[in-house]
């Protein structure tokens, strides 16, 4: 695993993002207790509205957990507050290069720990969810989310619940009150189709959600603040796309392909709540783009022209994290781009619409109708669009056991890929991290053979 | 009427309808589809209320993964395998893609796409609030447009109003059947037949009720009464027989094939009010608080309803009834909340069996054992 550590420590942006993901608990605690802020549970990238308030903090609930390695990261966090993250990164790189073994091992442990501890925590949440009574027939994502709420829902003031086409998701949201009935549930219904004046209804639903949020916040909603946030969000979306398309599609990577996939995986998880601080997240991701471009410019990194571009999707609801390492070892590079598949990386159209609520309504409606889609025809077109934009050489479809919504359409997708893209594809079944590595290995081995 | 005869009769009825130029629109069972609008356009609404088996489920795996709800799998299988008794499905002209649940969307889409059946769309918001009622009206308007495109004629308010009244009378008659003290399997058989044939079954239904009104059976007293809730029991399914074989009797069908369908009626005052027919349909949607499709209060409403039914049964027998929560495997709506549902009702002294199953024949023995064990627990 030091494969990742060697590479990641040279990106201070990655280090920061990892730190904020894994060691966020203390910061969240401070915000809640000292800063008198209100934590709002959020999953999927539906946190934007909360930034229209000065004291609401979206949190993807796993971030409230205690992670095993966080003490190392705390040291780093403390060091960074004195020396700055860039210097910490440089020092780490120096220590690593100097071959100071013990310190070097700590560094490896930190980065390796970020990945492993996250995976372990996901599995732990899965087990808590199942113990709580969620049927084992549901997907990994819902089981872990139930687990996260059983574990930490007491810390939040509300959950923000956006209805989407997945009925299991909507029922999961309803079930949260059975975990803790004291926590307010704020619902935001997205009409299934954009017909008639459905956008106006959606705008009204957003306003209702804002009223509920005002009750929690004690402050009035500030549309300037939300508009400013949308500008920041759009910058994040653009940088995220640069990483996926400009860097991901190039023939020279700033790091090895497995590390690059690892960074994409970290982005996928952290994007859901922008680590609770969108401005900081925007700076980090922008810096990430700069660092990557700089390295490419200097020729630091790896020629990946011979590595086949493999789009692995959908992975946001759970996937085997060894996948990208296996693909790399087999001569490929895995690219994760789920949020662009579902159109979460499109601009929130504030430049063309002055009312941020109206802009947000159009953004959400587009996600529903053209990203996730009202049906599998649209959804498969979304997968196709991104595979095409990436100029992917192959597609690995992650069939999440128990998912009836976004990962049940492989049969239809396979036909379209064969007909329109003429690239190979394969479906892998995923249930729980680490359960099925041998099979993943074998199937990916057979799949990657097709490129030789 | 046995299933073979029922389906054969139904097939004849459909053929006759086709000969008169009528169109047939099928849909997966759904409590928000405005069947009256189709009827008013001369389109026969065909509910897919047929139970499954292993062969049908397996046939769906070419299109959707095996972790799809067993009912959706079997519905695809009916079009794929096309067993001889279901040949009438060849007569289907349109299939409605709707979002009762996501399996409804994906299975209906598969049926339209791979079996070349033109598609109609009808979607419903998940969250229940004022705006979802307004959205429901938008879908009604859009559905009207789709139907008018098919029939090339206007759907007038008068025609729609007449259909609403026709279906209302039909549902009221079914409600009357519900109040008879009949053995559950018989009651279910008549409800299923009626819902399959639609209002044209009215006279037969009336006749059945009259013939059985005086035969209020004592035989039910020897059984342990249970309420069946959760997923519907479809035609050709043996579940209720298993319950009766084990000494139980379903005294109340708290399912879509059952109370949720025929309890959604309009009063005479409503029908005679100034509301236009679309207002009436929106009104009905608004009052449909027991629809499992909706969030966030479905479960609370469901629990309150079951406590109410139990209390009314208790008045008659001085005993709590049991509740069997029928969960078709991989059903998002009933499976997700099942443990909370059980916990809440058990606190009220109502014994609940969460009975999860698919349509494989091999689990029949296991189901029997679970039902028997459960019934032994009842007073």
Image (spheres, helix red, strand yellow):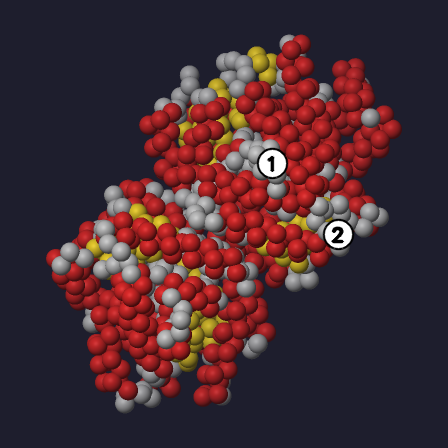
- For this view, does B300 lie left or right of residue B137? right
Q: Point out residue A355 in the picture as x, y percentages from the top left corner.
A: 61, 42
Question: Could you tell me if residue A154 is visible in this image?
Answer: no
Q: Which residue is mark 1?
A: A350
Residue shown at 58%/40% (left/top)?
Answer: A359
Q: Nearer the viewer, mark 1 or mark 2?
A: 1
Give above or below for A10 relative to B283. above
Residue shown at 61%/55% (left/top)?
Answer: A208
Question: Which mark, residue A383?
Answer: none
**The N terminus of chain A - image quarter:** top right
Mark 1 or mark 2: whose residue is earlier in sequence: 2
Parent chain of label 2:
A
Quote the CA–CA distance across marks 1 and 2.
23 Å
**In the depicted view, which residue is nearer to us: B283 or B306?**
B283
- For this view, does A254 lie left or right of residue B375? right
Q: Secondary structure at mark 2?
A: loop
Q: Secondary structure at mark 1?
A: loop
Determine crowd level at label 2: few under 14, some 14-19, many 20+ residues with C-alpha closer than 10 A. some
Residue shown at 49%/23% (left/top)?
Answer: A390
**In the depicted view, which residue is nearer to us: A17 or B281?**
B281
Q: Which residue is mark 2?
A: A219
- For this view, does A4 lie left or right of residue A383? right
**The C terminus of chain A - image quarter:** top left
Q: Point out residue A165 in the picture as x, y percentages from the top left corner.
A: 47, 48
């Amino acid at each position: 695993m030091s494969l990742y550590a060697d590479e990641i420590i040279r990106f201070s942006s990655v280090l920061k993002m990892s730190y904020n993901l894994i060691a966020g608990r203390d910061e969240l605690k401070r915000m809640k207790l000292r800063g008198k802020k209100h934590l709002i549970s959020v999953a999927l990238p539906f946190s934007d509205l909360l930034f229209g308030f000065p004291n609401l903090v979206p949190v993807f609930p796993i971030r409230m957990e205690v992670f095993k390695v966080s003490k190392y990261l705390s040291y780093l966090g403390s060091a960074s507050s004195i020396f700055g993250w860039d210097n910490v990164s440089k020092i780490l790189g120096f220590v690593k290069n100097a071959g100071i073994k013990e310190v070097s091992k700590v560094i490896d442990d930190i980065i390796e720990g970020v990945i492993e501890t996250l995976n372990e925590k996901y599995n732990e949440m899965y087990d808590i969810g199942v113990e709580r009574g969620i049927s084992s027939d549901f997907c990994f994502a819902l089981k872990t989310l139930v687990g996260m709420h059983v574990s930490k829902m007491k810390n939040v003031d509300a959950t923000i619940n956006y209805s989407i086409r997945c009925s299991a998701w909507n029922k999961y949201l309803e079930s949260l009150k059975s975990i803790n009935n004291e926590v307010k549930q704020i619902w935001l219904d997205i009409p299934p189709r954009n017909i008639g004046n459905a956008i106006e209804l959606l705008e009204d639903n957003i306003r209702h959600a804002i009223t509920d949020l005002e009750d929690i916040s004690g402050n009035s909603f500030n549309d300037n603040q939300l508009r400013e946030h949308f500008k920041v969000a759009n910058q994040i979306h653009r940088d995220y796309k640069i990483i996926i398309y400009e860097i991901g599609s190039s023939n020279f990577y700033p790091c090895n392909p497995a590390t690059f996939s690892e960074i994409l995986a970290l982005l996928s998880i952290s994007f859901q709540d922008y680590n609770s601080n969108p401005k900081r997240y925007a700076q980090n991701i922008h810096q990430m783009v700069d660092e990557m471009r700089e390295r490419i410019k200097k020729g630091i990194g790896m020629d990946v022209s011979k590595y086949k571009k493999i789009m692995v999707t959908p992975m946001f609801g759970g996937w085997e994290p060894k996948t990208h390492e296996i693909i790399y070892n087999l001569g490929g590079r895995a690219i994760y781009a789920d949020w662009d598949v579902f159109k979460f990386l499109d601009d929130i159209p504030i430049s063309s619409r002055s009312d941020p609520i109206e802009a947000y309504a159009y953004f959400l409606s587009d996600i529903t109708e053209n990203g996730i889609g009202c049906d599998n025809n649209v959804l498969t077109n979304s997968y196709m669009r991104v595979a095409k934009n990436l100029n992917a050489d192959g597609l690995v479809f992650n069939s999440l056991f128990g998912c009836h919504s976004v990962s049940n359409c492989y049969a239809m997708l396979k036909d379209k890929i064969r007909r329109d893209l003429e690239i190979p594809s394969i479906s892998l079944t995923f249930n729980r991290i680490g359960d099925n590595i041998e099979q993943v290995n074998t199937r990916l081995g057979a799949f990657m053979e097709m490129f030789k | 009427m046995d299933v073979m005869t029922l389906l054969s009769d139904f097939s004849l009825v459909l053929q006759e309808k086709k000969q008169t130029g009528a169109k047939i629109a099928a849909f997966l069972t759904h409590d928000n589809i405005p069947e009256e609008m189709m009827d008013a356009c001369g389109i026969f609404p065909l509910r897919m209320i047929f139970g499954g088996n292993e062969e049908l489920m397996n046939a769906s795996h070419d299109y959707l993964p095996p972790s799809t709800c067993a009912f959706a799998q079997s519905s695809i299988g009916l079009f794929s395998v096309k067993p001889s008794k279901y040949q009438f499905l060849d007569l289907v002209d349109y299939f409605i893609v709707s979002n009762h649940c996501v399996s409804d969307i994906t299975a209906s889409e598969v049926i339209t796409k791979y079996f070349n059946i033109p598609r109609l769309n009808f979607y419903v918001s998940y969250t229940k609030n004022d705006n979802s009622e307004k959205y429901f009206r938008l879908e009604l308007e859009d559905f009207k447009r789709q139907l008018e495109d098919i029939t090339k004629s206007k759907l007038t308010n008068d025609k729609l109003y007449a259909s609403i009244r026709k279906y209302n009378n039909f549902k009221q008659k079914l409600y009357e059947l519900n109040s008879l003290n009949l053995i559950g399997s018989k009651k279910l058989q008549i409800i299923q037949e009626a819902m399959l044939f639609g209002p044209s079954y009215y006279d037969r239904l009336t006749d059945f009720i009259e013939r059985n009104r005086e035969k209020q059976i004592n035989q039910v007293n020897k059984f342990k009464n249970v309420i069946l809730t959760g997923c519907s029991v479809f035609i050709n399914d043996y579940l209720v027989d298993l319950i009766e074989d084990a000494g139980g009797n379903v005294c109340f069908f708290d399912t879509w094939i059952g109370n949720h369908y025929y309890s959604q009626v309009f009063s005479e005052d409503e029908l005679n009010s100034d509301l236009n027919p679309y207002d009436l349909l929106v009104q009905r949607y608004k009052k449909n608080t027991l629809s499992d499709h909706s969030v966030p209060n479905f479960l609370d409403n469901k629990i309150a309803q079951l406590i109410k039914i139990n209390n009314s049964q208790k008045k008659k027998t001085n005993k709590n009834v049991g509740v069997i929560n029928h969960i078709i495997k991989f059903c998002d709506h009933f499976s997700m909340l099942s443990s909370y549902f059980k916990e809440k009702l058990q606190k009220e002294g109502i014994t609940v069996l969460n009975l999860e199953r698919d349509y494989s024949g091999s689990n029949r023995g296991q189901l029997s054992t679970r039902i028997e064990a459960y019934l032994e627990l009842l007073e």
